[in-house]
Image (spheres, rainbow, N blue to C red):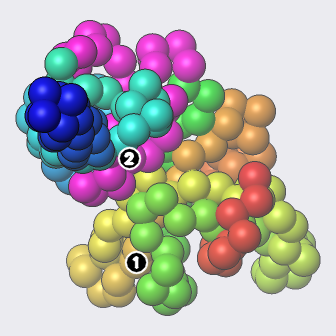
Amino acid sequence: MLVGVLLVLVSVAGVIFLVATADRTTEVFAARDGIGVGERLTPEKVVRAKVRLGDTEQHYITVEDGLPQDVVAVQRIAKDQLVPRASLGGVDRLDRKPVALSISQTLPSQAVAGARVDVWVAQPDAKNGFSEPKLILPGAEIAEVATGSTALGSSKTTVLMVLVEDKQMPALLGAQANDAKISVVWNPGGAR
């Protein structure tokens, strides 16, 4: 009889332990809105979320650990996305800077923050036209999309903020300074 009672108690304790460990949630931080590359991680930009992460917990910022100090997003963190440790770093880890491109053509609906586009440039030629376009930024990440207008509001443009590496900057800024025709093409493959 005593052995039977012990078996029942051990069995109940085992079930309680299994249920408790299987239902273990961790409170982590998620982006309140999208956090762009270069933005500081602050309490106003995150919300708390209870999730089951299991063995992957070490890859995310937990509430127990607290928000790290003096870090920025080194890659875009989408709205409601859990904040991964790999997406954060010091300002010195930023290897891309946002550059504004005024685009007059209609962009595909997929051209949103976080998407990738190829940036093509056609330089002005001597015949009041443009040379053949050349790809200067393959797979550039869009940091932001905004609506703009030309002088006196006569026509609408879209302003794309694309993230550009320092080594690619001279070609893009030179094209803008020379009034080149700049076009962007959505790159669903996202190749950089």
Q: Is residue 149 left or right of residue 165?
A: left
Q: What's the residue type where badge 2 is placed? A: Ile
Label 2 vs 1, first from the N-terminus: 2
Mark 2 packing: few (<14 Cα in 10 Å), some, or many (20+)?
Answer: many
Q: What's the residue type where badge 1 is placed? A: Thr
**Position of residue 53 measured from the top left corner of the image (x, y, whole percent):** 36, 41
| Secondary structure under the numbered disc 1 in the rendered image | strand
Q: Is residue 127 left or right of residue 31?
A: right
Identify the residue shown where x is 37% and y is 25%.
72
Residue picked out by circle 1: 157
Asked whether 110 or 104 is in front, the reply is 110
Residue picked out by circle 2: 77
Placement of 2 over or under 118, stated as above or below: above
**Position of residue 181 measured from the top left corner of the image (x, y, whole percent):** 68, 72
**Position of residue 23 measured from the top left corner of the image (x, y, whole percent):** 22, 45
**Position of residue 33 measured from the top left corner of the image (x, y, whole percent):** 21, 53
Work out which quarter of the rendered image holds the N terminus and state it: top left
Identify the residue shown where x is 26% and y is 10%.
69
Placement of 160 over or under 164, stated as above or below: below
Quarter residue 7 falls in: top left
**Label ID, residue 166:** none
| Secondary structure under the numbered disc 2 in the rendered image | loop
Q: Is residue 134 left or right of residue 54?
A: right
Identify the residue shown where x is 27% and y is 56%.
79
- The rendered magenta stretch, by its main secondary structure, is classed as loop
Q: Is residue 11 left or right of residue 179?
A: left
